[in-house]
């Protein structure tokens, strides 16, 4: 706990900061800020937030004040968007204004300044995005289909062997795919030291990088000068975070060099870079991009896969319809492949609904303004550190005007009357907006589709049963935090197509 003296200094700092922010606007605006709840002096609306699920607070405020609202957290202006049409108008059509990121002091303090997701809009960010585009663009992802299938086949048997939390098999699938593309790893089991360290770093980062937590360091800049031992809880882990960052940036990169020297390296983003003698990209940039390719995708993709498995238990009619579609299109003893995808629109609709029903990042990633803007009669300021603009993806997913009975998992929302898909998957709001849209969205689309198709072609997912033979109910409950997952639930997997199972065993050389 802070001492009374520290709190006194903190209060002085926040008063000074608020005064500076007001002066920085330089002029009285004729238009008001978007409406929002009245806050307390100094603290603003900080005490009114549900800190575990702030997206629910923003939805509640939206019902009172409208689809775009303003609040202030410790002197930081925040614009919350609860409408997809407003998000597309501002972040997509006016992306030149809304493509920056808010300054998050905890990012640098924790040694995560290389984080592509939070880089300011500028030349370094462009270099990162260019590399990501080369390896994750739609055309490049076509060449990964054999890799998707191989890992999806392994996932089926890992699920059959699973006895506890589904975190291990689902994370092993997403981790292996990303590691194959970035570093050329052929497998990445749950005991892999890289995976365990990366997961530890992700857990720390999720504590430190939320806008609400980072606002404290912005409001009280003197906190950055204090040693780590002054803090309790998550902030005590900053030193560990720096150590993990250095190990994760350097060790897998060094391992690829060793493999290249002895001729055992597989094709990957890193090997391609190291093979190009005239490469204009420096090694530190490549290390950052490789690591962020992994960290930026593993948790969100794992979340989506777990949500899919939970939905199939809760909605057996949907599961049965997908399997019937697969069986109608694909021969009984054959596995579905990417060539079958145009003939499996309901499966694609399920994928869209997974991300709609439970978007992995409920509040998306915060944007920041680079200049003053106006929308719908409201003023959106560019203040000293930029106004934080957040798209409440959970609110978008629960918009009853667009998604009636929004809490129900219903893939037909994404189909036309004649059963065809309505929209492009890559435009799904779960991938973000504007120039900061997820560069790996095609990779996620393909990896999820292959996993879902392979699982449902072979397995039935059902409720587990207790010792008396009664089924154990599954409640659609989720965790809290920046990236959400289903709460652990009981399950059972049963082979429903032995011919396909046999084919998978032969492909994987399993007895």
Image (cartoon, helix red, strand yellow):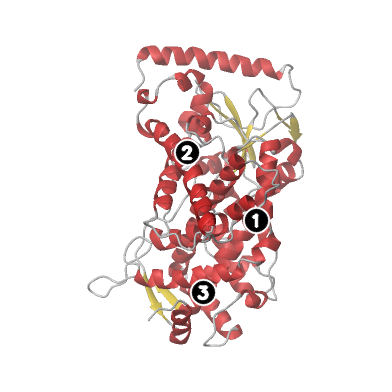
Mark 3 or 2 closer to N-term? Answer: 2
Separation (CA) of disc 3 from disc 2: 37 Å
Residue 299: which disc? none
**Residue visible at 55% across and 68% down?**
148
User: Which circle, 3 or 1, is nearer the viewer?
Assistant: 1
User: Which circle, 3 or 2, is nearer the viewer?
Assistant: 2
- In terms of depth relative to the viewer, which is nearer, 101 or 70? 101
Q: Is residue 243 above or below residue 490?
A: above
Q: Position of residue 221 (x, y in %)?
A: 51, 20
Separation (CA) of disc 1 from disc 2: 24 Å
Give yes or no for contact between labels 1 and 2 (Cβ–Cβ under 8 Å). Answer: no
Mark 3 or 1 closer to N-term? Answer: 1
Q: Which residue is mark 1?
A: 135
Q: Secondary structure at mark 1?
A: helix
Q: From this viewpoint, is residue 481 visible?
A: no
Q: Is residue 43 above or below residue 410?
A: above
Q: Which residue is mark 2?
A: 246
Q: Position of residue 415 (x, y in %)?
A: 66, 69
Give yes or no for contact between labels 3 and 1 (Cβ–Cβ under 8 Å). Answer: no
The 10 Å Cα crowd at callout 3, few under 14, some 14 to 19, many 20 or more, is: many
Quarter of the image where one finds residue 441: bottom right
Q: Is residue 276 left or right of residue 315?
A: right
**Extreme residue in the left direction:** 467
Q: Is residue 275 left or right of residue 218?
A: right
Q: Which quarter of the image is occupied by the C terminus?
A: bottom left
Q: Is residue 152 left or right of residue 4?
A: right
Q: Which residue is mark 3?
A: 454
Q: Position of residue 58 (x, y in %)?
A: 55, 40
The 10 Å Cα crowd at callout 1, few under 14, some 14 to 19, many 20 or more, is: some
User: Which circle, 1 or 2, is nearer the viewer?
Assistant: 2
**Residue visible at 35% across and 60% down?**
165
Q: Secondary structure at mark 3?
A: helix
């Amino acid at each position: 706990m802070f001492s009374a003296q520290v709190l006194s200094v903190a209060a002085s700092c926040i008063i000074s900061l608020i005064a500076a922010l007001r002066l920085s606007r330089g002029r009285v605006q004729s238009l008001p800020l978007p409406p929002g709840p009245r806050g307390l002096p100094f603290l603003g609306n900080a005490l009114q937030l549900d800190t575990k699920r702030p997206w629910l607070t923003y939805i509640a405020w939206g019902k009172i004040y409208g689809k775009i609202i303003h609040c202030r957290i410790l002197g930081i202006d925040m614009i919350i968007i609860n409408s997809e049409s407003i998000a597309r108008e501002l972040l997509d059509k006016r992306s030149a204004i809304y493509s920056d990121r808010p300054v998050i002091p905890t990012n640098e303090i924790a040694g995560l300044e290389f984080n592509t997701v939070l880089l300011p809009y500028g030349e370094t960010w462009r270099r990162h995005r260019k590399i990501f585009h080369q390896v994750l663009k739609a055309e490049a992802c076509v060449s990964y289909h054999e890799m998707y299938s191989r890992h999806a086949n392994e996932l089926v048997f890992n699920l059959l062997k699973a006895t506890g939390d589904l975190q291990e098999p689902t994370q092993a699938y997403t981790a292996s795919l990303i590691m194959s593309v970035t570093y050329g790893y052929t497998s990445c089991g749950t005991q892999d030291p890289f995976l365990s360290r990366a997961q530890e770093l992700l857990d720390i980062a999720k504590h430190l990088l939320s806008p609400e937590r980072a606002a404290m360091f912005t409001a009280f800049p003197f906190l950055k000068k204090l040693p780590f031992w002054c803090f309790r809880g998550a902030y005590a882990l900053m030193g560990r975070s720096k150590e993990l960052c250095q190990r994760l940036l350097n060790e897998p990169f060094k391992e690829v060099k060793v493999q290249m020297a002895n001729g055992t390296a597989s094709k990957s983003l890193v090997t391609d870079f190291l093979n190009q003698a005239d490469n204009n990209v420096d090694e530190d940039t490549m290390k950052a991009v490789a690591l962020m390719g992994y960290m930026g995708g593993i948790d969100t993709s794992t979340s989506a896969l777990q949500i899919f498995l939970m939905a199939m238990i809760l909605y057996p009619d949907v599961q049965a319809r997908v399997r019937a579609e697969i069986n109608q299109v694909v021969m009984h003893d054959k596995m579905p492949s990417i060539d079958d995808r145009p003939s499996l629109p309901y499966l694609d609709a399920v994928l869209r609904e997974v991300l709609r029903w439970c978007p992995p990042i409920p509040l998306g990633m915060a944007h920041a303004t680079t200049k003053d803007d106006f929308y719908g009669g409201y003023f959106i300021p560019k203040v000293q550190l930029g106004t934080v603009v957040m798209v409440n993806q959970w609110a978008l997913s629960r918009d009853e005007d667009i998604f009636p009975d929004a809490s129900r998992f219903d893939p037909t929302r994404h189909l036309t009357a004649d059963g065809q898909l309505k929209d492009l998957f890559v435009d799904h709001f779960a991938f973000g907006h504007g120039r900061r849209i997820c560069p790996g969205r095609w990779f996620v689309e393909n990896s999820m589709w292959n996993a879902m198709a392979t699982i449902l072609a072979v397995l039935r997912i059902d409720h587990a049963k207790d010792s008396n033979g009664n089924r154990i109910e599954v409640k659609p409950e989720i965790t809290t935090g920046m990236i959400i997952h289903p709460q652990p639930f009981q399950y059972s997997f049963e082979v429903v197509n032995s011919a396909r199972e046999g084919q998978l065993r032969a492909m994987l050389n399993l007895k």
